[in-house]
Image: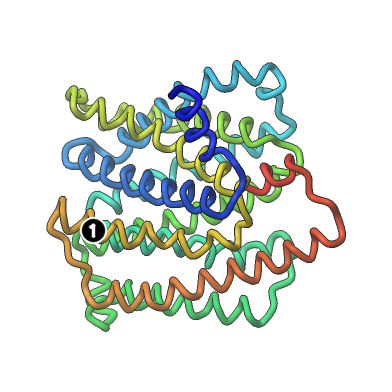
Amino acid sequence: MFALSSSSSAWFFQKGYAQGVFWIILVSLISNMNDILMRLTGQRLDPMQISFFRFFFSTITLIPIMISEGKSAFKTQRPGLHVLRAILGFGAVAFWCYGVSTSPLALASTMAQTVPLFVLPMAALFLKESVGWQRTLATLTGFAGILVILMPSGTLETLMNINPQNLGIMALLAAAILFAVSDILNKVMVETESSYTMLFYFALGTTIVSFGPALLVWKAPTMNELIYLVALGGGANLILYCLLKAFAATDVSALAPYRYVEMLSAGVFGYTLFQEIPDIFTLLGAALIVPSTFAIAYYETKIANKGKDQKPVTETDKTKAA
């Protein structure tokens, strides 16, 4: 019986398409869980304080892993970029936390898919990466989807109205832009930094950066809130772990369509837990954003595959790319 149990559990850590799909769907579900936890804690706690606890517990749960990896995991050649990345990360998560606490889960999940739309022009501008007409067209289509979501009544007047949901949408948009800038930094840093080093110093740096703002709005968390916050910090690390497992199991291009499970499950959770029904403008925006980001992922993979033909890819390279 033990041998059977070990054999069954070993399946999850083997390479294969089914294993990759399993891990990427876990990423989507954990992302939904984190958004729900932010919503629940955001009913009373300020986004600044939630962000601090998220980073703090993420750091705590990472320390045993870093120790097991040895001293080399703590070495870095880019301390300045780690500081910049921490500042950007704090801003991104704080904006995201506010947006999730005031916007429907399905809308937040849709906005999460827009990060590649901002990464592409930034990569062309700052990293001098070539952008073909296909990716340019996909990016413009995605931006059209964002505009549909930003103007729910179809008029600019509604967008200018100051109310929690409009501010929440703008906060989600600001978070997506900051996440995109962080991704650009990631592309620069992966050349010299390991995944564990980047993950740990991001968690530690954002904990330090967010501590001051959190003190200004501090409220003692209840026991339930504290449990949610611990789960939020651990969930942030689990997302990366599952991503690495998914990318190690099969090609990134094969997994791209399954990233949109997050949007479907967000709609289900939003309706079940908060009685939210996505409006027509969210659905129309998603109908433009989803295929455009999928197209970008497809062309990015084609370019990456061309690079593989010219240079062998090691397991270390795969980990850094993830």
Q: Residue at x 17, y 42 (%)?
A: 43
Q: Nearer the viewer, residue 102 or 69?
A: 69
Q: Residue at x 74, y 32 (%)?
A: 77
**Residue 242 place in picture, x, y as percent:** 50, 42
| Secondary structure under the numbered disc 1 in the rendered image | helix
Q: Quadrant of the N terminus?
A: top left
The residue positioned farthest toward the right in the image shown: 310
In the image, is 72 to the left or to the right of 32?
Answer: right
- As rendered, which of 162 and 55 lies closer to the eye? 55
Amino acid residing under circle 1:
Val
Q: Where in the figure is residue 268, as x and y percent of width and height?
A: 23, 58
Q: Quadrant of residue 85?
A: top right
Question: In the rendered image of this protein, does residue 114 appear above or below residue 93?
Answer: below
Residue that carries the numbered disc 1 in the rendered image: 268
Count of marks placed on residues: 1
Q: Is residue 101 left or right of residue 242?
A: left
* Residue at screen point 47% across, 29% down: 4
